[in-house]
């Protein structure tokens, strides 16, 4: 039977885990414990050796214009990818590969790429010039391209201000010059142009920071 290789690619490669199967079966080499995330397009790369042709199918499997594949699983604990291989002698075989489905981690707001899960961030006024707001999914095994489109900022003793875009503007910077040493600034209500999980966006944890002179 033809050897079959299917790789689940994330941005950062780590050591590969191989499932234990007889030599006559397909070999599946995957990183990160065979995990795919529910509701997002997980990139996969497929190669079949010494075959006349093959067809890939499965719930949530689709092919991009560039020929690459993605797997967007639905609900449940696991999903399957099927590979129907036609050999040169005309015989056919269907191989099945199982992936564990995992929910998305909770997103957290970032300021100039910095974030904190334990305490508050500290910045200088110089660092706040055109500082960028972003989000990060801690422990997400691959990157998803997105951009923050709106956020709100609450400065001590001032009303909450809603900002379109992802940049700390000059007007906000002028307000930040008035904060005191022990004042906290809160950035929340962060919105992006990418909706995770079939449009069901988890709440993004806010950014809390202080300004030092």
Image: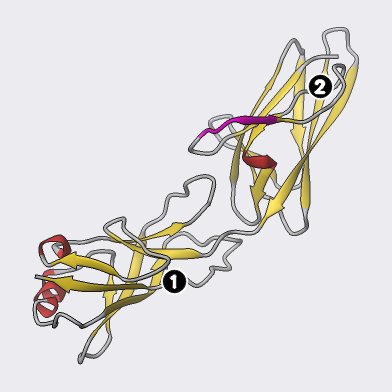
**Which is more toward the observer, 183 or 82?**
183
Q: Which residues are magenta?
A: 13-17
Q: Residues within 10 Å of mark 2 (few under 14, many from 20)?
A: many
Residue 192: image location, x then y, percent: 41, 64
Colouring used for the render: secondary structure
Residue 143 horizontal side relative to residue 73, left or right: left
Secondary structure type for disc 2:
strand
Q: Quadrant of residue 3?
A: top right
- Tell me how far mark 1 sits from mark 2, CA to CA: 46 Å
Residue 4: image location, x then y, percent: 75, 21
Secondary structure type for disc 1:
loop
Instruction: Identify the disc placed on residue 133.
Output: none
**Which is more toward the observer, 24 or 116?**
116
The residue wearing badge 2 is: 85
User: Quadrant of the image for the N terminus?
Assistant: top right
Q: Quadrant of residue 136?
A: bottom left
**Which is more toward the observer, 64 or 116?**
116
Observer-side mark, 1 or 2, equals 1
User: Quadrant of the image for the C terminus?
Assistant: bottom left
Mark 1 vs 2, N-terminal side: 2
Task: Give me the residue at 58% from left, 68% from top.
Answer: 200
Residue 67: image location, x then y, percent: 58, 29
* Residue with the most extreme right position: 91
Residue 168 horizontal side relative to residue 57, left or right: left
The residue wearing badge 1 is: 205
The verdict on residue 22 being magenta is: no
Residue 81 horizontal side relative to residue 207, left or right: right
Q: Residues within 10 Å of mark 1 (few under 14, many from 20)?
A: some
Task: Give me the residue at 16% from left, 64% from top.
Answer: 128
């Amino acid at each position: 039977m033809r050897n079959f290789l299917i790789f689940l690619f994330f941005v950062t490669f780590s050591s590969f885990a191989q499932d234990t199967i007889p030599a006559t079966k397909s070999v599946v080499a995957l990183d990160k414990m065979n995990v795919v995330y529910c509701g997002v397009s997980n990139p996969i790369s497929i190669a079949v050796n010494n075959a006349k042709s093959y067809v890939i199918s499965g719930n949530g499997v689709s092919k991009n214009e560039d020929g690459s594949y993605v797997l967007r699983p639905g609900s449940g604990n696991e999903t399957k990818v099927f590979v129907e291989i036609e050999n040169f002698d005309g015989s056919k075989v269907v191989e099945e590969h199982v992936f564990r489905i995992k929910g998305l981690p909770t997103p957290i707001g970032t300021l100039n790429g910095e974030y904190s899960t334990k305490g508050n961030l500290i910045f200088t006024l110089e660092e706040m010039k055109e500082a960028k707001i972003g989000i990060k999914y801690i422990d997400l095994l691959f990157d998803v391209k997105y951009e923050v489109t709106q956020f709100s900022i609450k400065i001590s003793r001032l009303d909450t201000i809603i900002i379109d875009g992802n940049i700390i503007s000059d007007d906000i910077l002028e307000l930040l010059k008035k904060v005191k040493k022990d004042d906290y600034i809160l950035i929340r209500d962060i919105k992006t142009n990418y909706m995770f999980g079939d449009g069901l966006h988890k709440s993004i944890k806010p950014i809390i920071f202080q300004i030092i002179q």
